[in-house]
Amino acid sequence: MEYKYEKLTDKIYVCASSDHRFGTDAFLLADFSQYRAKDKACDLGTGCGIIPLIMQKKLPPQVTYAVDIQEGAIEQLRLGLEKSETNGIVPICADLKELWEGAPLGQLDLVTCNPPYKVNNAGFQSVITAQKIARHEILCTIDDVCAAAQKLLKFGGRLCVCNRPERLSDVIYAMKCRDIEPKRLRFVSKNAEEAPWLFLIEGKKGSKPFMKVEPQLYIRSENGFTEELQKIYDTGKEQA
């Protein structure tokens, strides 16, 4: 396996590979989660640990459990942590459907998840097993994610996920079935002319119904990245 270290700051590196890599959606979800320094957090299906590592850039949660069922993903996260100066990331190789011994049930403020976007057997599936797991609901479904979050979150705790617009009703239904009430929703488009390719949603455990739809986020402008996206990428970077 060939690894490549991607630099987030002078002190934080992500170990990426063809099996476990990351894209813009990870940065968008980390930003959308509005994590706080006092939070106890968990990232489900963490892959190379990109979301917990992004959170390390500025005022990170006091602890972030980074959970993935694939040993290769957790090994990459550990390699990234060895090269980085971080505090409070706990790598855990576990099945989110079962969690792990000593899991902080009912104690967390925030759970994030960038889940598989496609239902199993839908669309083209890569021949690489790790990529299949990342893209298709082979080892877990959105209901499994919400069930795990329900167990981990305290009352009022938040679940933040991203997904493709065609899965919006599935995600909302799964949240509501697990007493996680959708509270914030934001769509992401490449530009003002194109339909959204992604949505970001936050649900609160035990909350009453009321959902705010936030202004749409655009990725590109005539001059490249939009000012908002560039700010999301740059948040927490050390200044030269």
Image: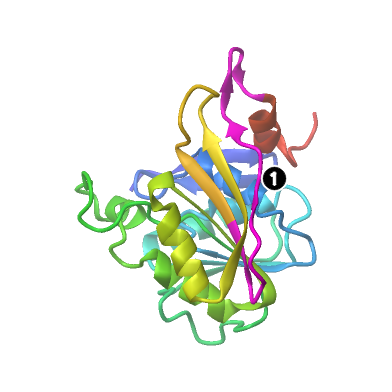
> Where does residue 151 sit, x and y in percent of width and height?
55, 81
Q: Residue tagged by mark 1?
A: 11
The vertical placement of 202 against 18, above or below, is below
Residue at 49% in and 61% down? 172
Looking at this view, is 52 or 218 the one in front?
A: 218
Residue at 52% in and 60% down? 78
In the rendered structure, the answer to whether residue 154 lies left or right of residue 199 reads: right
Region of the chain picked out in magenta, as a range: 202-226
On-image quarter of the C terminus: top right
Q: Amino acid at mark 1?
A: Lys
Does 213 appear in magenta?
yes
Total tally of numbered discs in the picture:
1
The vertical placement of 198 against 51, above or below, is above
The vertical placement of 171 against 199, above or below, is below
Looking at this view, is 2 or 233 the one in front?
A: 233
> Where does residue 87 sit, x and y in percent of width and height?
71, 61
Dot 1 alpha-carbon crowd within 10 angstroms: few under 14, some 14 to 19, many 20 or more: some
> Where does residue 222 sit, x and y in percent of width and height?
59, 12
In the rendered structure, the answer to whether residue 124 lies left or right of residue 196 reads: left
